[in-house]
Amino acid sequence: MLNMGPAHPAMHGIIRIILELDGENVVGSEVEIGYLHRAFEKMSEQSGYLQVIPYTDRLNYVSPIINNVGYCLAVEKLFGIILPERTQFIHVILSEFSRVADHLTCIGASAMELGAFTAFLYMIRAREYIYELMEEVTGARLTVSYTRVGGVKGDLPAGFEEKAKNAIRETREILKECDQLLTRNRIFVDRMKDIGVLTKEKALAYGITGPFLRSTGVDYDVRRAHPYLVYDRFHFEIPVGSRGDNLDRYLCRMAEMEQSLRIIEQAFRQIPQGPIQVDMEGNVIPAAEAVDEAKMGRIEKLAGSRIAPDPTLEGAHKDQYPEIEAPEKRAVLPPKEDTYTNIEGLMNHFKMIMMGGGFGMGGHGIRPPKGEVYFPVEGGNGELGFYVISDGTDRPYRVRVRPPCFPILAALPLCLNGGTVADVVPTFGSVNMIGGELDR
Amino acid sequence: MVALSGWHRGQPLQDNPMEKIHERIKEKFSHAVLAIHQFRGDETAILRKESSLEVFRFLKEDPEFDFNVLMDLSAVDYLAFEGPDPTRPYVITGKGPRFEVVYHLYSFEKNHRLRIKIPVEEKDAVLPSIISLWPAADWYEREVWDMFGIRFIGHPNLKRILMYEEFVGHPLRKDYPVNKRQPLIGPKN
């Protein structure tokens, strides 16, 4: 018997694998999870619909945007909101960048565990380009909380496309280098090939999705099977493996990153241009001054002006609203120009931000109609589903996450048994376990 | 392109011969299906507990339905739900059964989805396990037991999964206080 974990240097999170050994060979194994349980589902029931968004950042913390998008799409489905086209493209672009970051982390870390430290450093450098882009758009690197119900926090900043294209070029360069370092590397291939094999039938029986399933030869991808957002407008391939071993999972992820970059390039060609850099009348008034002027009733010069509230709200001006937010007064906060200068905007804002109150028109907060929806998106590790139930109040009655790691970890003993102790590390690395989404 | 995301794109739902799965199940198993409904394109069938296993086996094995993947399994506690609920049309008077166990099925070949719900009374919170049909149910059923205290007959290893063995109660039940702490080491309240 050997305990691997809960805190082992080659573990990607806190998890315990109990191995039953016969010499070097693994004859039995059991996986124990729950060390990072933070009661996401219970906390979501206590918070308003918007307050759940920061919690979703902490599910898969390597690709938080995809969680944000998945949750907001589920709530929008409850409302029946259709997002503006530009927002859908923004969602796609940032989701694909996150997917690349996710795969880079997974491959980099598992390569490092096999001794390929250079590849790890190169890949983290590529990930850094992506995180810098994220920071540019959202203001944060990991806990981004970028989407809102019915829109996004703010439009893409000026010059984003240039920076994104630069990041794509650099990432491609690094992927090429890593491909040369790893794909035909004798040591790497010997450790990965025919190790941790899972058959197609077993993978489907265990409900596994994502790169793990695709490596066994099943071409299931939520983006293709149930196209959400604007994914049906892009050309991309779904890479599939044949053996279902560690090497296939590595190759699938490498190929998927290239496909994600392809999608981003196509998205930049197709995205409808927003009114970036187009000022309404050229006047920019500080927020505090606007509020004072509006209190005194001097609103003539405020009409048609931009208000500069705070750098964190950059990109959410009134003239940008039609492009990035759905025209849905039940769910979308009014622009700051309205909140600060007229009573309708102020009341609208107040009603959405405050919580509590009774049913019907008297209640505060965002209140979707009663009902239940399930919305799947393609996360870094597979199908990320949000099952949201509304009871008509300002708090979700139930938020259930289908974490893509969970079924993979359930099937992990099948991959480990019959191998050796040394094989546990690459096999576990190829799972790309993310403690945050596994334990919630 | 399937119905699931049709509404979201502002397009009408596509005419799919496999649509209305829930209605066809209702016709086939009129004794087992309590109610059906559809909300935003999600098709749902609510089953009676007694005959659920029979329906599940049919859904998995019949080539016309061919639900070979169990995508998700969870539960809902309806203790605090106020007012009528359009997603539980079988509740006519009072609150109805306290729990519902929710299954999300997916067919890889047919590319369609179905949600199955089974109402469970608090006094008799026991369900047959579907682990023999979909091994994926193993951990999901453990999680439902852990979080809601619903037991699954025929599960070989039904123990807590996210919480620890010494934990008292089931945290996702609506009557479990959100700020109640019971750490193994440290202050309690």
Image: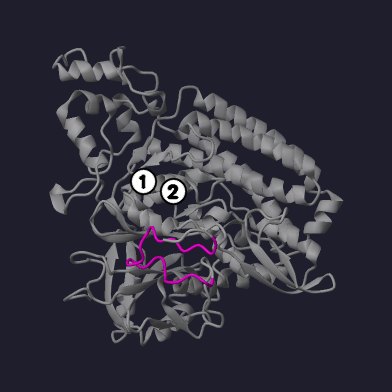
Residue type of the residue flagged with mark 2: Tyr
Q: In this orientation, does residue A304 appear?
A: no
Kindly check if marks 1 and 2 are in contact, taking CB atoms under 8 A apart as contact.
yes
In this view, B158 is above or below A436: below
Residue drawn where x is 39% and y is 55% of the image: A43
Position of residue A28 measured from the top left corner of the image (x, y, whole percent):
72, 75
Residue type of the residue flagged with mark 1: Gln
**In the rendered image, which residue does mark 1 sit on?**
A51
Could you say which is closer to the camera, residue A186 or residue B125?
B125
In this view, A267 is above or below A419: above
**In the rendered image, which residue does mark 2 sit on?**
A55
- Residue B33 lies left or right of residue B126; in this view the side is left
Would you say the magenta stretch is mainly helix, strand or loop? loop
Q: What element does badge 2 sit on? A: helix
Q: What element does badge 1 sit on? A: loop
For the record, the magenta segment spans B165-185
Tell me the tag on residue A13. Answer: none
